[in-house]
Amino acid sequence: MATPKKLAALLAGRGPHSVLRGNLALAGQPGVVFSPAEGYNLPAVAFGHGWLLGADRYANTLKHLASWGIVAAAPDTERGPIPSHRGLAADLGTVLDIVTGVRLGTGNISVHPDKLAVAGHGMGASVAVLAAAARTDVKAVAALFPAPSSPSAEAAAQTLSIPGLVLGDAAVTDSLNDNTLSLAGAMGGPSVFRRIEKASSDGIVEGRRLTSPFITGGTEKSTVRTTRILLTAFLLFHLTGEKKYEDLAGAAEFKGTRVVDPHAPIADQPKPSPLSAVRAVIGR
């Protein structure tokens, strides 16, 4: 059996499937969908974007998931400075209803209603938790570098019993625009919390990050690579049951990351390197 290291190297690249892109607006919901070129009873994930961003800023990550056999769709709503978190959560649910209720492509692509997940980045990560708590058909939730939401994602997380993945940057504590630690600690279901060294909270965003205080932020290749590996393994294991990804989806050692117990006292948590801590602050 392949080791987690070999599987990670495999998942870092494109998967075996050709990818199609579709427009969710044709079904009444602004957004995009990427899917394998063919396949029935596929798994699917609805992805929530970060503050002041949109679905296009994650297009290559969505394509990556689709290349590994996962239908990946994202609403392109609530992009303004005062977004409705409830509204975006509802849109994630609508996206799941569309991909399960409509034959995609030319009709030879379908999603299995028991293989659904939600995920998101920043604001969208907490919104994904809200969406998961509002439905009974979601089987897994992934929160990537989460930021606070209203209503509270922590309160919603406590009601969950499904597997969760929380990824955070190298910082040890939360801040006004980072609730990674508190959200990871609130997860009611079995969950894994990892911090990614040398990552900033917006490092997976594609293109220049205009919300960066120095207007110089850009996509971080190492952060993108690590995030895609862990997210893909998590979804494949929990949605399709592919056991070879179990370790990567869990707490296996993985270079450049550290699994953290969110309930441990701050003083006992492993400290990031000085460079990692500086990059985490600059990235916000």
Image (cartoon, rainbow, N blue to C red):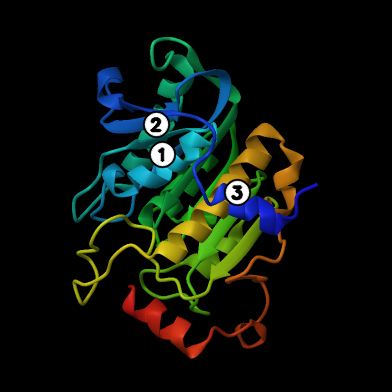
Q: Is residue 8 above or below residue 76?
A: below
For badge 1, the amino acid type reads Lys
- Number of labels in the image equals 3
Q: Earlier in the sequence, mark 1 or mark 3?
A: 3
The kind of residue on which mark 2 rests is: Phe
Labels 1 & 3 near each other (Cβ < 8 A):
no
Q: Is residue 157 visible?
A: no
Q: Position of residue 74 (x, y in %)?
A: 36, 37
Quick check: 126 above or below 236? below
User: Is any part of residue 194 visible from this angle?
Assistant: yes
Q: Distance between the residues labelled 1 and 3?
A: 16 Å
Element at badge 1?
A: helix
> Can you identify the residue that label 3 sits on?
10
What label sits on residue 34 in the rendered view?
Answer: 2
Residue type (three-letter) at the residue carrying disc 3: Leu
Q: Are marks 2 and 1 in contact (CB under 8 Å)?
A: yes
At a point 19% along the width and 64% down the height, the residue shown is 210
Q: Which of pointers 3 and 2 indicates the residue nearer the eye? A: 3
Q: Name the residue under label 1.
A: 63
Tell me what residue is drawn at x 23 percent, y 62 percent.
208
- Side of 133 relative to 96 (left or right): right
Q: In this view, does 17 lie to the left or right of 161?
A: left
- Label drawn at residue 52: none
Q: Residue at x 58, y 85 (%)?
A: 271
Q: How crowded is mark 1: few (under 14 residues within 10 Å), some or many (20 or more)?
A: many
Whether residue 30 is situated above or below residue 132 in the rendered picture: above
Q: Considering the image in quadrants, where does the C terminus appear?
A: bottom left
